[in-house]
Image (cartoon, rainbow, N blue to C red):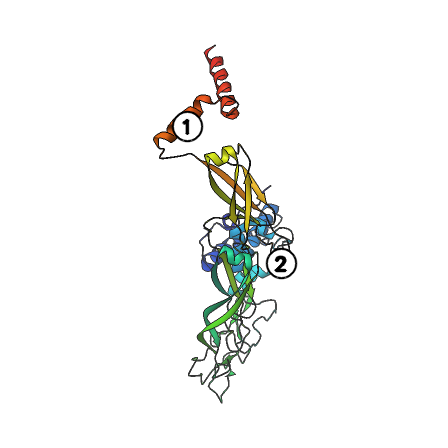
Amino acid sequence: MAKADYYDTLGVGRDVDATGLKSAFRKLAMQFHPDRNPDDPVAEQKFKEINEAYEVLKDGEKRAAYDRFGHAAFQNGGGPGGFTGDFGSSMSDIFEDIFGDMMGARRGARTGGRERGADLRYNMEVTLEEAYEGKTAQISVPTAVTCETCSGSGSKPGSSPVTCATCAGAGRVRASQGFFSIERTCPACQGRGEVISDPCSDCSGSGRVTRERSLSVNIPAGVEDGVRIRLAGEGEAGARGGPSGDLYIFLSIRPHEFFQRDGADLFCRIPISMTSAALGGQFEVATLDGSKARVKVPQGTQTGKQFRLKGKGMPVMRSNALGDLYIQVVTETPQNLSRQQRELLEEFERLSSEKNSPESAGFLSRMKSFLDGLAD
């Protein structure tokens, strides 16, 4: 039985944003939670399915892979397959908003406000020739970098953050509501445990400033359309000295004037004259490695005939293998005939027999038999 689409499972459109996705998940999770549906295997299975869908779609990287490849993106060990009903990570998104960390898992422990920077995406287009050879590209990326004035602390030089008076540095505050003791993120320090009393004038206390960075990206030979290259630590700088995120380069291959690509193989359609197809001949074709290959056309070549040039295709990424180049010939019918040319073709037609055009003669013969059968 095929898996249901993750978006359909959560009842959202493919353009849903993070807020809408979380809202839809929260509603369904509350509805099908095992505690609300004891001894109901249908509800339990539904709960697992919505949890699996949310685990994928809430993660930008996993969602991008799912949008491109569907469930196949996570087969054969590609995650997130292995769901066994352990829904702790997804449910924390819901119950942390309502109950906080009631079980004592103090994830809001004091961190000094250090937060990991966001991952960044950069779209790069390369030519087929560049994909064949590989290249080192220089790119400029506007991003948040660590403030040099305060070294990322967010405090004015000579000062330092102070312990939050509201939560005493815990990052969380506790309040009692009925039978529950609810712990929530501290509203004064946003869970950091510290506040900046004298912020840096250059970054206004964030520990980061926006700059344009120049980076070198290595494009391997044989790279395919849609490949993603990860530059670890080259994303947005973390807040107040936190670790940087990653930069992801998404590659696309520009359409080529002559060649079409299928994996490591290349395909090219080349028109030839009617006389070359009938009498035979040869022609040269340029290849991506900079050389020329000679293609011999035998007598009586028909439109659609393919010729294979072994090893003249694309390199297979991170290997020594090479694909092939397939040349497909298309016979061109003569146009703008002179009087003499027309007379010669008419003479050729008069002298022709079924042996010269066996395929058309055979087809017409079969069609005539078919029509005679209908008449009977």
State which quarter of the image contains the N terminus: top right
Q: CA distance from mark 2 to mark 1?
A: 54 Å
264 or 124: nearer the eye?
264
* Vertical position of residue 258 compared to residue 152: above or below: above
Residue 5, relative to residue 95: is it above or below? Answer: above
Q: Is residue 75 left or right of residue 261?
A: right
Q: Residue at x 49, y 17 (%)?
A: 370
Estimate the x, y position of residue 54 in percent, counting from the top left.
54, 55
Name which residue lies at 46% across and 16% down.
Answer: 371
Mark 2 and mark 1 lie on one chain; the one further toward the N terminus is 2
As rendered, which of 100 and 83 lies closer to the eye? 83
Q: Amino acid at mark 2?
A: Arg
Q: Which residue is mark 1?
A: 345
Inspect this view and state whether residue 7 appears: yes
Residue that label 2 marks: 318
Residue 2 pos. (x, y %)? 58, 43
Q: Secondary structure at mark 1?
A: helix
